[in-house]
Amino acid sequence: MSMTKTFLGAAGVCALATGAAFAEPGLIIDLGGKFDRSFNEGAYNGAQRWAEETGGDYMETELTSEAQREQNMRRMADRGANPIVTMGFANASTLEQVAPDYPETTFVIIDAVVDQPNVQSIMFDEHTGSYLVGIMAGMASETGTVSFVGGMDVPLIRRFACGYAQGAKSVDENIDVVANMTGTTPAAWNDPVRGGELTRSQIGQGSDVVYSAAGGTGVGVLQAAEDEDILAIGVDSNQNYLHPGTMLTSMVKRVDNAVYDTFMAGTDGQIEPGLQTKGLADDGVGVAMDEFNEDLVTEEMLTAVQEARDAIIAGEIEVHDYYDDDSCPALTF
């Protein structure tokens, strides 16, 4: 069978090359766009990798408004997709309502926890990966000021910022960390113009390294960094290739692997409900190194990152988790 992705009007079953029949898995892509070059695109890439390797088909839908959340989720379940992967914390309340109505369907949500017998929740330790890129920012900065641009002002994004600030201050406690969020509505995930404006404002405050955790808005952040000749740090997907020469690194969050592994496990009925957390030890988060940033990263940086990674895994360094108490000791928002 040729590899394809089908949309909601397509048939709901397919067969692997082995001939075993199973329901098509489904992917619900969140607001911000499938090709945001970050979180959503990582999920899409994982689904495509599964399709290429197995020859299988999957259903896909892309949200364009808040009003579509429940409708699209139910429509995909009604069409027989199984498992269904839904991206983003904003789908949690919808899934709480929808999952009980489809007890034979397995749902997987990324970036939120939904306690239902047919739901698997996948979370990532964004704060620890952000700590590592914070170390790199602190070591690379020549001005003593680094910055952060977040998307929607929610606890998840504050978690990124908090870990980043703690990592930077582990290099020098006197480093200034400037942080701005793009907005308080889902539109904040797809506003590259505003992302660029915030970055330029931070540069005006002395920042010479900016970390973006803002979905599609980050495209504007990274472009502004190149235009103003400062260093930038990407997020979720490896974004180093976007601006070689100014991309210090990317804090990769392997949502691609999460989707790929879910689709693979789903074909065998091996998805267990409950919570999975992916972090440094299993390369769920980490620092991207490749030919696009190798000239910017010193051996001292690599050593510092590796030592910190090992110490975090061993419990010798504790990275504060914003989720624990809604606070960030290293940063004032």
Image (tube, grey):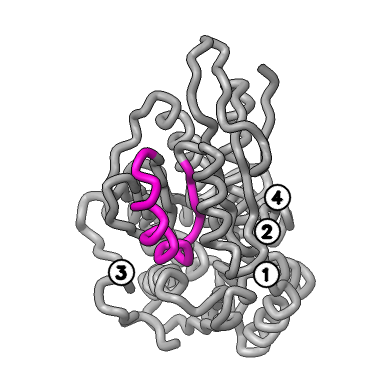
Give me the residue at 60% from left, 50% from top. Answer: 238
Alpha-carbon span between mark 1 and mark 2: 8 Å
Nearer-N-terminus badge (4/1): 1
Q: Is residue 236 left or right of residue 2?
A: left
Q: Label 1 amino acid?
A: Asn
Seen from the viewer's position, the closer of residues 28 and 78 is 78
Crowd class of label 3 (few under 14; some 14 to 19; many from 20; radius 10 Å):
many
Give me the residue at 44% from left, 63% from top. Answer: 94
Mark 1–mark 2 contact, CB under 8 Å?
yes
In the figure, 321 relative to 274: above or below? below
Alpha-carbon span between mark 3 and mark 2: 28 Å
Q: Nearer the viewer, mark 4 or mark 1?
A: 1
Tell me which segment is drawn in magenta. 84-104
Crowd class of label 1 (few under 14; some 14 to 19; many from 20; radius 10 Å):
many
Q: Nearer the viewer, mark 3 or mark 2?
A: 2
Nearer-N-terminus badge (4/2): 2
Q: Which residue is mark 4?
A: 241
- Label 4 residue SS: helix
